[in-house]
Image (spheres, rainbow, N blue to C red):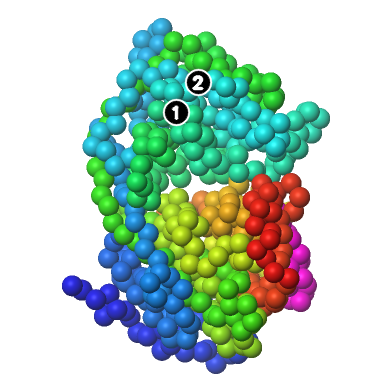
Amino acid sequence: MLNPLRLVPPLFAALLAASPAASADRTDPARLSAITRELASDAYGGRAPGTPGEALTVAYLERAFRDLGLEPAGEAGTFFQPVPMIRTQLGADGRYAVTGPKGETVLAPGRDISVISLLPVDRVTIESAPMVFVGYGVNAPERGWDDFKGVDLKGKVAVFLINDPDFEAAAADPIAGRFGGRAATYYARWTYKFEEAVRRGAVAALIVHQTEGAGYGWSTVLASGGEGYDLARAKPSAERLPLQGWLTAEASTRLFAAAGLDLEALRRQARSSDFRPVPMKDLAFSASVEVSFSRFESRNVIARLPGRKRPDESVMIAAHWDGYGEGPADAQGRRIRPGAVDDALGVAGVLEAARLLKAGRRLERSVLFALWTAEERGLLGSETFGVRPTMPLDRMAANLTLDILQTAGPSRDVVLVGAGQSELDDFLAEAARRQKRTVTPDAKPERALFFRADHFSLARRGVPALLLMGLGGGADLVEGGRAAGDAWVTRYTDDCYHKTCDAWSPDWDLRGAAADVDLVVDMTRRLARVGVWPDWRPGSEFTRIRDETAASRRP
């Protein structure tokens, strides 16, 4: 059997020899660059879970943690946590159609519809299932909201709007602010909507795509190519839909019109708590598509710096190691999607934070350094840790996540995704002041970035979490100001996000990324003090969950 450790390139310590200008107590941009360059090289094949690139990646990360002198914090005394997974792929010749009074409308994959299945079956067949429009599909008793009103969805296809009910509300609208205004709640996420459809017995769920509400265009929806990933489950049919996915806005408008319904008028009605599900009169959805599936085991890589006073209490610093692997050839014939910024650079930040914290004075609490698999496939690695934590979540003070750091140089501020969610905002602001920087909230909170990264797997279990993500808005760069920061975000998002050009470059200026990692190190040193327990803000979706374990946290 091939030993992946023999595949490891030059040892971590040798690869990361300190640059002459590096400070002993600051993140070294040259180290960030060296680690990112290695992990984003062609040898790693884009770091897709379950591929030879994974074996090389996790071996490199294990060696890195060992060279830093950290303890294993995975399972069975290792640095690894197994993540059993399945991969599904829909056949390219699948057929999707809607029948109604005026005949049959065939939905073309890619042009009209994009779906996946997360069931390990040979074929998905849906025959003439009634379609029901459920508005935003939100059931939120704490906000006095129920879009379902007891309507039976068993055996039916649920059609949802993306985002949540006050996403498009005007300031004078009575609903304005009920769901955070433009700032998305968890109810805005497509994952929530699919979970709700499962709970109510639907056979499929389709979301009407809207670029602004989703936070990404149709091309990003198509990136899956009919491929799905999920955790291996004992009873998958009880937890996953036979089909889930998206309809284009154009196809949706046609289908609603075929049912004698006005989509835009229904969109307005859905912004009222009086909304009731609307049967799409005489329309029935059918699908027949072959499914291929395979099972494999991926791995999280987790290390620990033990605390000197309360080793059972912790602070976590995390990023995801996985990328999208290989895909269709681009105009230059490149197939590997290197995932340099997303998220090899975040991994480099975690390793640099580990180096600095290990070299400093021993902290009172333990620090966990977690590098997750399968973030790009639905936060599956971090979700596995949420289900099987290797340290207790009720005694974890905070999760600090790095996902997509900017490469355009130093900035006067740091962009915070999910501002207002927890008291960690105050810790970040304090650390930023020590750098003579400010904190800028996410410029477009309606994109729900706070619910789209690995920290969410911990947040949904009550752990206060903070996400530093360069896509939250353009930083106020020292050279070029906000305009230059916005240009970097636009260029990266439009040209390179999840694509072959997300590659390492010698032209990067990583001083800004290094300063953001230093913020995380600074925050960790303060959060690792005994008795420091940041909390969620009143009104956060996660306050109640954290409150349930309050008795386990010692002063």
Task: Using residue 411 as the reference point, say whether residue 90 is left or right of it.
Answer: left
Marks 2 and 1 sit apart, C-alpha to C-alpha, by 8 Å
Q: Quadrant of residue 277?
A: top right
Camera-side residue: 490 or 280? Answer: 280
Element on which disc 2 rests:
loop
Rendered image quadrant of residue 136: top right
Pick out the residue farthest to the bottom. 20
Q: Secondary structure at mark 1?
A: loop
Of the 4 image quadrants, the one containing the N terminus is bottom left
Q: Which residues are magenta?
A: 421-443
Q: Does residue 264 show up magenta in the picture?
A: no
Looking at the image, residue 164 sits to the left or right of residue 505; the answer is right
Checking the image for residue 152, the label placed there is 2
Pointer 2 or 1: first along the chain: 2
Above or below, 116 relative to 355: above
Circles 2 and 1, Cβ within 8 Å, touching? The answer is yes
User: For the point 78% across and 28% down, which residue is it?
Assistant: 174
Q: Nearer the viewer, residue 537 or 16?
A: 537
Q: Which residue is mark 1?
A: 201
Q: Is residue 428 visible?
A: no
User: Hey, what amino acid is under mark 2?
Assistant: Asp
Q: Is residue 282 above or below residue 204?
A: above
Q: How far across and how far down the image is residue 55, in percent?
A: 31, 69
Q: Determine whether, in the image, residue 521 is placed left or right of residue 154.
A: right
Q: Say which residue appears at 58% left-offset and 77% top-offset.
A: 311
The amino acid beneath tag 1 is Gly
- The residue located at (29%, 78%) in the rendering is 5
Q: Which mark is residue 58?
A: none
Report whether 411 appears left or right of 391.
right
Residue at the top extreme of this rendering:
101
